[in-house]
Image: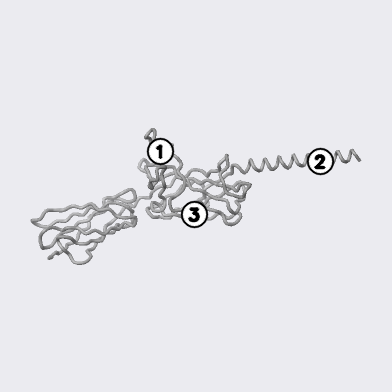
């Protein structure tokens, strides 16, 4: 009887130790998982798009089943604001896009794909609070390896997986789980044009014009030149918005008559310079 009792106690203790060991092992395993970014059916092939093009990111955990409440967080490798002591701008992994929060899972083993518009929705916040685009030249000193082309622009991106802890809250543990690092690069538009039109009455002292660059290359500069015989040539440099559009009221000159208005997109990271568009504008007021 005493022997059976001792055996029972031993077995119970052994089960407790085993249970504790298993729980410890599971906790340790939960600290770091294998996470990847998937592009279609492939992994590790990177992303590329023209300005405003869709970048669709599909994270996946390959070492466990994802649970409701767990999260995926974006991180972009970018140059931070200047250090208050050294004055240096360090390259580091910056969390989040300005307009998007973490992806939080609603159902078990169901991770939604995340899409954003390249160059439009990927603004980040630096340590000093400045909102900037993370797009930079992909050189060896910025990304740690030699890019495929010396003129490539874009940024590096990865995602952090935040598993649920014992309280049920999604947190990063001491062994953080990251996907591989992927490159997001620009496909530059190799042909652009400027379309513009007069709005309202043409006045030599000030005429309103609408300008549109296509395909949309985002914020950039249009050079506008106004010419008329026996009048001073006027040149303006005007900025387009994120939709490649701008509206400006421009002085044509001081005399009545017909002016030639020339418009040329100067080119930027997302598109080459355009040919020059020209219109004749008769101003008699």
Q: Earlier in the sequence, mark 3 or mark 2?
A: 2
Q: Earlier in the sequence, mark 1 or mark 2?
A: 2
User: Left or right: 183 with respect to 247?
Assistant: right
- Residue under label 2, please give it: 11
User: Left or right: 222 with respect to 172?
Assistant: left
Dot 1 and dot 2 residues touching (CB under 8 Å)? no
Residue 77 location in percent, x, y? 44, 42
- Residue under label 3, please give it: 114
Residue 40 location in percent, x, y? 51, 53
Dot 3 and dot 2 residues touching (CB under 8 Å)? no
The single residue placed furthest to the left in the displayed view is 230
Classify mark 3: residues with Cα within 10 Å, few (<14), some (14-19) or many (20+): few
Q: Which mark is residue 72?
A: none
Question: Residue at the spot x=59%, y=42% of the render?
Answer: 32
Question: Residue at the spot x=36%, y=40% of the render?
Answer: 150
Q: Secondary structure at mark 2?
A: helix
Q: Nearer the viewer, mark 3 or mark 2?
A: 2
Q: Earlier in the sequence, mark 1 or mark 3?
A: 3
Quadrant showing the C terminus: bottom left
Q: Which mark is residue 142?
A: 1
Residue 41 location in percent, x, y? 53, 52
Residue 172 location in percent, x, y? 56, 44
Dot 1 and dot 3 residues touching (CB under 8 Å)? no
**Number of labelled discs?**
3
Q: Secondary structure at mark 3?
A: strand
Classify mark 1: residues with Cα within 10 Å, few (<14), some (14-19) or many (20+): some
| Of 174 and 33, the residue lying toward us | 174
Q: Secondary structure at mark 1?
A: helix
Question: Residue at the spot x=40%, y=49% of the render?
Answer: 123
Q: Quadrant of residue 139?
A: top left
Q: Nearer the viewer, mark 1 or mark 2?
A: 2
């Amino acid at each position: 009887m005493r022997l059976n009792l001792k055996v029972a106690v031993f077995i119970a203790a052994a089960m407790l130790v085993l249970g504790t060991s298993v729980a410890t092992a599971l906790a340790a395993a939960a600290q770091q998982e294998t996470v990847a970014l998937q592009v279609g059916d492939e992994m590790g092939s990177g992303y590329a798009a023209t300005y405003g093009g869709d970048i669709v990111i599909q994270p996946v955990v390959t070492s466990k089943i994802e649970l409701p409440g767990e999260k995926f967080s974006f991180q972009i490798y970018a140059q931070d604001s200047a250090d208050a002591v050294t004055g240096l701008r360090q390259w580091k992994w910056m969390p989040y896009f300005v307009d998007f929060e973490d992806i939080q899972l609603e159902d078990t083993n169901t991770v939604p794909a995340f899409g954003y518009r390249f160059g439009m929705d990927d603004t980040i916040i630096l340590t000093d609070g400045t909102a900037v685009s993370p797009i930079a030249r992909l050189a060896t000193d910025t990304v740690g390896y030699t890019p495929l082309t010396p003129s490539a622009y874009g940024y590096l991106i990865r995602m952090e997986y935040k598993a649920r802890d014992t309280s049920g809250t999604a947190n990063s543990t001491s062994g953080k789980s990251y996907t591989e690092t992927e490159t997001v690069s620009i496909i530059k538009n190799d042909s652009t044009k400027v379309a513009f039109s007069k709005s309202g009455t043409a006045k030599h002292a000030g005429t309103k014009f609408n300008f549109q660059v296509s395909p949309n290359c985002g914020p950039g500069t249009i050079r506008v030149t106004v010419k008329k015989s026996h009048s001073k040539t006027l040149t303006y440099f005007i900025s387009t918005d994120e939709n490649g559009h701008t509206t400006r009221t421009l002085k044509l000159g001081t005399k009545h008559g017909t002016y030639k208005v020339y418009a040329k997109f100067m080119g930027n990271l997302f598109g080459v310079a355009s040919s020059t568009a020209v219109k004749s504008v008769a101003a008699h007021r």
